[in-house]
Each structure stands twice: as C-alpha cells, then as structure tokens.
Image (spheres, rainbow, N blue to C red):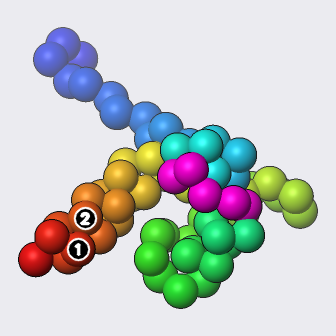
Amino acid sequence: MLGVISMEPIYLSKKEVVRKLKKSPSTVVRWSKSAVIPMPIKLGPNTIVWIEEELNKALEERRIKEVS
C-alpha cells in the first residue's frame, strides 16, 4: 500500500534506558515500580525492554510537572 507508514516500536534494553536517563540500574527499576517511568515488557527470564515512545512520553510529562 502506498502512503502507509508502518511505525514499529523501538525497544530499549535496561542498559540503554540507564544510559539515556544517566541513572543507575537500580534507580531505573525503582522508578518503574513507582510509576515514574512505564513498567518494562518482559521478553524472557532475563530480558526486559521499554518502548521508547512510552518512555519519552513519561519523561516529558515529568519535565512538565517539574516546571509547573
């Protein structure tokens, strides 16, 4: 189909989220559990990922609250 853009979600590993937020892995997990950032998606027994768009949206909302 012409004109249709398929936007596949971009998944970020815990390591990538840690790097993006400049926080420790334990802080990322704590923020997930306390709803500061979205909960990750569990892909396997040792693999979790975040959807980049959801993470960015949560961070932007947090910035807006801090400014207000």
In this picture, residue 36 sits left or right of residue 41: left
Report whether residue 10 is seen. Answer: yes
Where is residue 56? Give x, y as percent: 35, 52
Where is residue 20? Give x, y as percent: 52, 44
- Residue 12: quadrant of the picture: top right
Task: Report which residue position mark 2 lands on.
Answer: 63
Name the residue rendered at 48%, 70% in the picture: 38
Between the C-alphas of marks 2 and 1, the distance is 5 Å
In this picture, residue 39 sits left or right of residue 35: right
Q: Quick one: quadrant of the C terminus? A: bottom left
Q: Residue type at mark 1?
A: Glu
Mark 2 falls on what kind of element? helix
Range covered by the magenta-colored residues: 21-25
Where is residue 65? Give x, y as percent: 20, 76
- Depicted 20 relative to depicted 28: above or below: above
The numbered mark at residue 25 is: none
Residue 14 included in the magenta stretch of the image: no
Q: Quick one: quadrant of the N terminus? A: top left
Name the one closer to the observer, 55 or 28: 28
- Residue 64: quadrant of the picture: bottom left
Task: Report which residue position mark 1 lands on.
Answer: 66
Name the one closer to the observer, 53 or 60: 60
